[in-house]
Image (spheres, coloured by chain):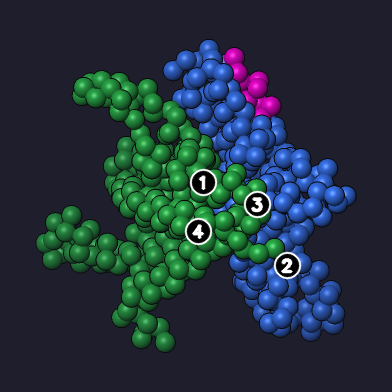
Chain colours: A green, B blue
Amino acid sequence: MTFDLHGFGPALAAGTLMTIKLALSALSLGLVLGLLGALAKTSAAKPLQWLGGLYSTLVRGVPELLWVLLIYFGTVNLMRSLGEAIGYPQLELSAFAAGTIALGLCFGAYATEVFRGAILAIPKGHREAGQALGLSRPRILWRIILPQMWRIALPGLGNLFMILMKDTALVSVIGLEEIMRRSQIAVTASKEPFTFYMVAAFIYLGLTVVAMTGMYFLERRAARGFIRSAA
Amino acid sequence: MNWDVIIKWLPKLADGALLTLELVAIAVVAGLILAIPMGIARSSRNWYVRAVPYAYIFFFRGTPLLVQLFLVYYGLAQFDAVRKGMLWPYLRNPFWCAVITMTLHTAAYIAEILRGAIQAIPRGEIEAARALGMSRSQALFFIILPRAARIGLPAYSNEVILMLKASALASTITLLELTGMARTIIARTYLPVEIFFAAGLFYLAISYGLVRAFKLLERWLRVDASQGR
């Protein structure tokens, strides 16, 4: 068996690019949602705690594929009525937007727990020191909590990003032309399913290795100032 | 929200949920059996013993389950040897393909859990077993594995719930489990929100039940009592 791609190489490369774009945009949305979720869960207000808990429990209990399908097919009527309200009735969610929202939602639910753990891991004295210096609450969050939180949260977030990258394959189900969808098209034309799905598998492996390397450098950068004292 | 439709299709969804449970149950049990030798080999001191499970785990954890499913269900048919082989009746059946793939997939993750658990056992306990005159295999069966089972149990329960959610992918190879059933019903009723909502409730209920069951199992195995050092 030879790895003859029957001229589908460029299509697969374009699919890889789409996968990377989807993963990064879902990551951005997920980080924001995760941060908001963690802040809600660690806040003093009971309703916010409840809301954060509801979000992370509900989203984590339902399969990612179901979220992808629900957001893509379930919002058609909603988007249409929204479109009619603003005078653009053919408004609909693209597969890319639906995939970003669904995967971002799932990433955010898991990231909520990671961020919450990181916030709780910061010694109480640091926050109190900020208050004693007369810093406002947003300032304490921005200058004291967040910069320290990254270092603690990074390994957990790295794991979640690897999971997210593999979950991008699910968006092929709603027709987004990423690696899997492009492979399916190539399979229909060439009748060589094993060859093309194996190529897809190796592209994902390659992406995972790249992400792992990136995480290694990010973690080293976040831990600068800690490496010396630990040794 | 159209509740009548949900109630009308509830029995069908329950059928799907049953198939989901069946898939997950076979996969996590068979995966555990497959993972035990791999986890032991993975925590070996010799690099050549570690290498084989490492490569296996790297492949199965580095690629999406969807790709693995398609490789088994669609991919294997590319080879004449497979199509003419004795296993073909199983390999062309979507149920067995899903079971095989999910088992191989989860075995990789469970093997890693097991490796972590084996390496987390305090060295003194293994040395104590050896000092009492136990052979290496006796120490493995009577000390290391029972201890690793308790350390790894919480992570294993997480993996079972992840597999419950991963089983939704079986719908892409035409299997009518919970998600597949929901999609079929939607194709007839055109009510995606209601039916997916009901399917989501089923998943939530199943994962809640699993969490409770593992809590009971942890108490029965007295996991927290054995955590004291």
Residue at x 40% of width, y 83% of height: A230
Q: Which residue is mark 1?
A: A181
- Marks 3/4: CA–CA distance: 14 Å
* Residues shaded magenta: B8-17
Q: Amino acid at mark 2?
A: Met
Report if residue B15 lies within the magenta region: yes
- Marks 1/3: CA–CA distance: 15 Å
Instruction: Report the quarter where the C terminus of chain A lies.
Output: bottom left
Determine whether A76 is above or below A132 in the image.
above
Which of the labelled discs sits on residue B38, or is there none? 2
Report if residue B99 lies within the magenta region: no
Q: Amino acid at mark 4?
A: Gly
Which of the labelled discs sits on residue A102, or is there none? none
Q: Is residue A116 visible?
A: no
Residue A203 in percent (x, y) is at 52, 61
Determine whether A36 is above or below B45 in the image.
above
Q: Nearer the viewer, residue A126 or B119?
A: B119
Q: Amino acid at mark 1?
A: Arg
- State which quadrant residue A126 falls in: bottom left
Q: Is residue A222 visible?
A: yes
Tell me the element at label 2: helix
Tell me the element at label 3: loop
- State which quadrant residue A154 falls in: bottom left
